[in-house]
Structures are given as C-alpha cells and as structure tokens.
Image: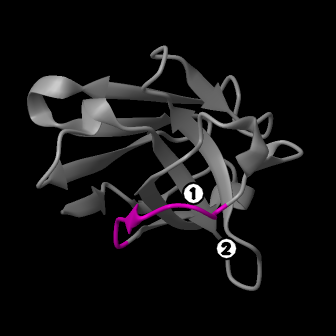
Amino acid sequence: VQLQASGGGLVQPGSSLRLSCTASGFTLDDYNIAWFRQAPGKEREGVSCARKSDGSAYLADSVKGRFAISRDNAKNTVYLQMGSLKPEDSAVYYCAEGPCSDDAYYSGDYILPYGYDYWGQGTQVTVSS
C-alpha cells in the first residue's frame, strides 16, 4: 500500500499548481484522503479532505476560495488544485489516508496529523517572486 504525492514546484505569487496523490495497493475512493502541509519550523497542518462518507470536501479557511480537492477514480488519484498562491503557501505538501471525516481530528480550522496510516512522501511547493 503506497501513496505518492507529486506536482510541486517553484512558482510566482498568484500562480497555480495541481498536486496529485496517487495510490497503489488500494482504491482511493474507499478512503478519506487529506492534504497536509508543513513549512520549516512549523507544525504539520491539514488543509483539505476528500471525505469518502458523503463525497464532500473540506477546505481550511486559509485556502478556501483558492484551493479545491477532487478525485479521479479512474486514475486512483486525488488532486489538490491550488490557485492564487501566496508565499505563505510555501511548504512540503503531503497526502494521507485517515480520519478527516471525523470532527474529533480537527483543531480549529486545521486537520490534525494524527490517526493517518499511510502518507505520501511529500512534494515541495515554493511560492516566491
């Protein structure tokens, strides 16, 4: 069972990127998939969740209106479409399978990085002029 995150890069403020989280060994559509990010010296924070229970999506307020999460079941992939990127979005982004459909795993606006069994290896996003 493996998750692989990809699609990061160096972009200018205001640009867009699409991150991909592709699974091998299991079907992503059967699971909640969350996107986390971690900047140097900061805690890992979850910014988006694609919930399996009702197909709904969660987006933290800090990214709402700029990011979107979606699934492509045929490709066994979950995407994080990021737009209007800001320097503060710079971080290593990880996808993970876990309990982001459960409100107990949230703290304030962010998804807590606990209870996740499988993590992708991370992809670096740098937003800089």
Q: Is residue 89 left or right of residue 3?
A: right
Q: Nearer the viewer, mark 1 or mark 2?
A: 1
The disc labelled 1 sits on which kind of residue?
Answer: Phe
The disc labelled 2 sits on which kind of residue?
Answer: Ala
Check the picture and name the quadrant holding the N terminus: bottom left
Foreground of the two, 15 or 31: 31
Q: Is residue 46 visible?
A: yes
Tell me where residue 44 appears, x and y as whole percent: 67, 69
Tell me where residue 88 appears, x and y as whole percent: 74, 59
Q: Which mark is residue 36?
A: 1
| Count of numbered circles on the image | 2
Location of mark 2 (residue)? 39
Point out the stretch of residues depicted in magenta: 113-121
Mark 1 and mark 2 residues within 8 Å of each other at the beta carbon: no
Tell me where residue 32 appears, x and y as whole percent: 44, 38
Q: Main secondary structure of the magenta part?
A: loop
